[in-house]
Image (spheres, rainbow, N blue to C red):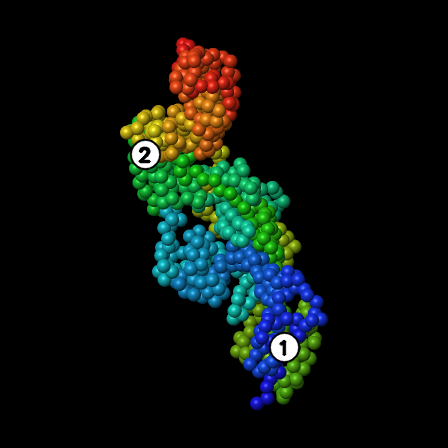
Amino acid sequence: MPKKNPPPSDQPELPLTSGPASAPASTPAVPAASAPRPVVTDAGPDAAPAMLEVATVPEKNSPDAPLVKHYRSWFLEYASYVILDRAVPHIDDGLKPVQRRILHTLWDMDDGRFHKVANVVGRAMSLHPHGDASIGAALVGIGQRAFLIEPQGNFGNTLTGDDAAAPRYIEARLTAFAKDVLFNPKTTVWQLSYDGRAQEPVSLPAKFPIVLLEGAEGIAVGLATKILPHNFNDLCRAAINHLQGKTFRIYPDFPTGGIADFAEYNDGERGGKVKVRAQIEVRSKYLLAITELPYGATTESLIESILAANAKGKIKIKHVDDNTADAVEILVHLPAGADAEKIIQQLYVFTNCQLALSPAACVIQDDRPQFLGVREILRRSVDKTKTLLQRELEIRLGELEQQWHWDSLERIFIEERIYRRIEKSKTWEEVIGEIREGLKPFLKQLRREVTDEDITRLTEIRIKRISAFNRFQADEAMKKTEAEMKEVKHHLKHLTEHAVKWFETLQEKYGKGHKRRTTYDEIEQINAASVVSVNQRLYVNREEGFIGLNWRQHEFVRECSVLDSVLCLMGDGSLKVTRVADKVFMGRDIIHCAIIPADGDKNFYTMVYQDGASGKAFAKRFQIGGLSRDKLYPLVPSEGSKVIYLDVSATEKTMPKQLHVSLDGRGGARVRELDFDLRAVPVSGRGAKGLTITKWVVKAVKRVDAK
């Protein structure tokens, strides 16, 4: 069997040697850092026994590396895919791809009855290649809002956060509103599904700003969108105002109700902020009732936040009852002696009874994500609706003109007995010719030319229809067609008025029962320190260096709140500040422990310390100044120093003015007792070194002037 030739190679073939392969002597040496590294590989089983092929392995990070082309644009492609096909809604219909495919599937399956959600999910999988879980979750989400999908069965509870039942137990169908505003095959642009087996819409021909009605939230690669839901009637009125050239404003309306502050809404663009609060009622002296939730919270998450705040001592309650069913009712029972108004303020500050939302309206337009304000989204959506209404009118006018033409031909064909001319015709061409000849005297009555298709249609009229032809009925049908044509032409001529009428009809038909649930008002900022309860007891373990709350076995410092900060000064001259907690290590040998007031520590400190580096004793007077929590601050210049005396005074006038210093006799000092005048020591910052008292070791220091 003849041997196959080895595959061609751009590299020269080298002779097989016992040592490493080397280039011919005439080949110039190439530095390893810049030249491809030759690797000797076997050319194959049929290659000549004395020859091997050299394959070139590009250097590291070379653009010619085998896998570079596969990874060069992978991130951009993946990011674009997530943005366009998963996370961000399209401005035309306000839907993400999975939502659009679910609604199209329901429209395709629609027979007026409910369909098992499991069946809908299965059908939608032929269009959406991401599994049943994402489809089912998206369908339940649309069904819970009930604008586009009518649910039947347990679809969960958005108030409590309860999940929906399994897809095999629940059913759904399109709402009448969805059928009116989302579907029209004549104006839909179609594309092939992911596997090419079916067609799906590029976007549904929506004639309403669905994205503002439903709201949208999604996280893509490098960007996120958060569009808050709006009220149906508000959107209708805003659309009408835009069509009429009037100014308008729209604010979100949350299905959970509550109170919202839209002062910083920023039209829903990035950088805006919305404060939302629960609605809290005072039922009695010791009973509060939460009847509306802030958007983004559920009764479960709200109750958990209340219990957590109570456990941390931020609020004081007895217990909480949840009576939520169709409406929210969370009962908060207060202990005896509690102030209901203050507890309400604490609930807003320390629990999920008040939340902050950060809108960022991002939509897909022209295959690109765009950040727009909600008013601009509404304008573009309404303009798109106007264009779709115009297109529908044009299509309808064409259909009516075609119907009028066919009705006129049929009437002439029957009344003038043109069908008798074809009785003796033997071929199809003769039939067509006879009918065309018979129509010639009446062509002026028509509005366009007669085509072969028109003549063919005349030949398909049954004898029964000819014999039962009623001229009066035919005239009435044509008058009805002409009247509708006149109406359509009028709408085309007055398109804006027609679009206004469209939104007015929608509001009249579907706006009942959709009152605003969210009231908007200015929400004042509550100072947490002013409403927190002083219901904790601070203790200190000076020896081991710990502070904590409610340690009865250690030294009591004072009453405090969980928001207070505690300051500790240690015997080595270090200082630390931290938030009050159950147990915190501050540093060993705590000589001073105090709560820092809300307006800062304004005390005056007098300190005598023995410097670890020089051995001298120094005196300093200072104020603490600004501090950061959980950071160690040295008040002495060197390690190994020791604080001998510390005085804390509320004012400069009450600071000590003279100290009596006792020296250690073992140090060799001749004078063992001396008085030091502190008036020579200026009040400085905490980092000051101070003035020298003595070079000898100090045994004790005491204040000798009267306070």
Apparent side of residue 63 relative to residue 150 in the rendered image (left or right): right
Q: Is residue 516 above or below residue 164?
A: above
Kindly identify the amino acid type of the residue bearing the numbered disc 2: Ile
Q: Nearer the viewer, residue 419 or 618?
A: 618
For this view, does 349 lie left or right of residue 358?
A: left
Q: Residue at x 51, y 48 (%)?
A: 226
Tag 2, which secondary structure?
Answer: loop
Tell me the residue that label 2 is attached to: 317
Q: What is the number of callouts on the image?
A: 2
Percent across and percent down for residue 521 are 48, 35
Q: Residue at x 47, y 12 (%)?
A: 677
The amino acid sitting under disc 1 is Pro
Residue 319, given in percent of the width and then of the height, sits at 30, 37
Pointer 1: what residue? 15
Q: Residues within 10 Å of mark 1 (few under 14, many from 20)?
A: some
Q: Residue 608, percent across and down? A: 44, 20
Asked where in the image residue 280 lies, by quadrant, the reply is: top left
Question: What residue is rendered at 53% in x and 36% in y?
Answer: 263
Residue lying at the far top of the rendered structure: 706
- Return the x and y of residue 8 as percentages of the image width and height: 64, 77
In depth, the one of 384 and 344 nearer the eye is 344
